[in-house]
Image (cartoon, rainbow, N blue to C red):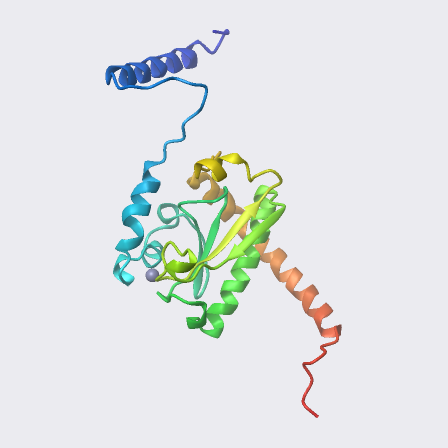
Amino acid sequence: MTSPGTGGSDARAQARASADAAATDGFELPGAPDAFERFWNAHRMAYVSKGTGQVKDEHTCPFCAAPQRDDEDSLIVHRGRTAYVVLNLYPYNPGHLLVCPYRHVPLYTDTTTEEAAEMAELTQTAMLALGQAAGASGYNLGMNQGAVAGAGIAAHLHQHVVPRWTGDGNFLPIIARTKNMSQTLGETRQILAGVWDRAARDHAARRAANARAAAEHPRPGAGDPA
Ligand SMILES: [Zn+2]
C-alpha cells in the first residue's frame, strides 16, 4: 500500500523485506512459516555462556570498567561520591537501573557506612527519576548476592531498581524468557540523566519532610535501658 508522500520509505521497507526474504530463502533450510514474531537475542546467550565466568577480579569486572568510560558509552546515568547509577545491559523492564559502589566488593556487608548510605540515597533518587521520566507506578528493589542467589556478576555488589507498570508482566518472559524493549538503552540513559537533578531535588525535599515526621514519631524499644 502506497500513500502520497511516503513512497520513499515504502520503497526502502520493500527493499529491506525482499533482501530479508532473499537471505532467508537462500539458505534453503527447513522451516514452517507461522504468525509469530521472533525476538532474536543471541547476545544474551553469549553473556550467559561466557560473560559471568569471565569476571575474575577488578580487571575483568564490567562494574569496575564502566566508570572509566564516558557516560554515553557505559550507560551511566549518574555518578555519586562512592557509588554510581548505570542502566542494566540486560533489563527486566525498560529503565532497569543498577546502583553500584565504585569499589569491587561482593557483599552488602562489605560496604562502608558512607557507601551504604549513598547506595540508599541513589536508589531513592533513581525511583523518583523513573517516576518522573517514565511514569513508573511500582518498583522492585533487590541485591542478589552470590551466584547461588542469582547474581549475574557476583564479585561486584549491585542493587537492582526495576520500574513496574500495570500489565508489564506479559506472557513473553514467562514462557519464552524474552523481554520486548520499546526504547534503546542510549535513549533511556539520556532521558534519565536529564531528569536526575530534578529527582535529586525532589528527594532532598522528601527527606526533609520525612525527617520532620520521624522526629515526632514515637520510637518504642529504642530508648536507653533504664
Ligand atoms: Zn568490580
The C terminus appears in which quarter of the rendering? bottom right
Q: Position of residue 98 (x, y in %)?
A: 45, 54
Asked if residue 183 can be seen in this view, the reply is no
Place residue 90 in its image quadrant: top left
Residue in view at x 46 percent, y 69 percent: 115
Residue in view at x 49 percent, y 63 percent: 119
Indicate left or right for 137 with 4 as reference: right
Q: How many marks?
A: 0
- Ligand 1 located in image quadrant: bottom left
Residue in view at x 46 percent, y 61 percent: 80
Indicate left or right for 210 with 139 as reference: right
Indicate left or right for 63 with 37 as reference: left
Indicate left or right for 99 with 45 as reference: right
The residue positioned farthest toward the left in the image shown? 27
Q: Nearer the viewer, residue 127 or 145?
A: 145
Looking at the picture, does residue 42 appear above or below residue 99? above
Asked if residue 93 can be seen in this view, the reply is yes
Q: Position of residue 15 (x, y in %)?
A: 34, 13
Q: Nearer the viewer, residue 79 or 147?
A: 147
Q: Position of residue 32 (x, y in %)?
A: 36, 18
Looking at the picture, does residue 188 appear above or below residue 4? below
Q: Position of residue 86 (x, y in %)?
A: 43, 52
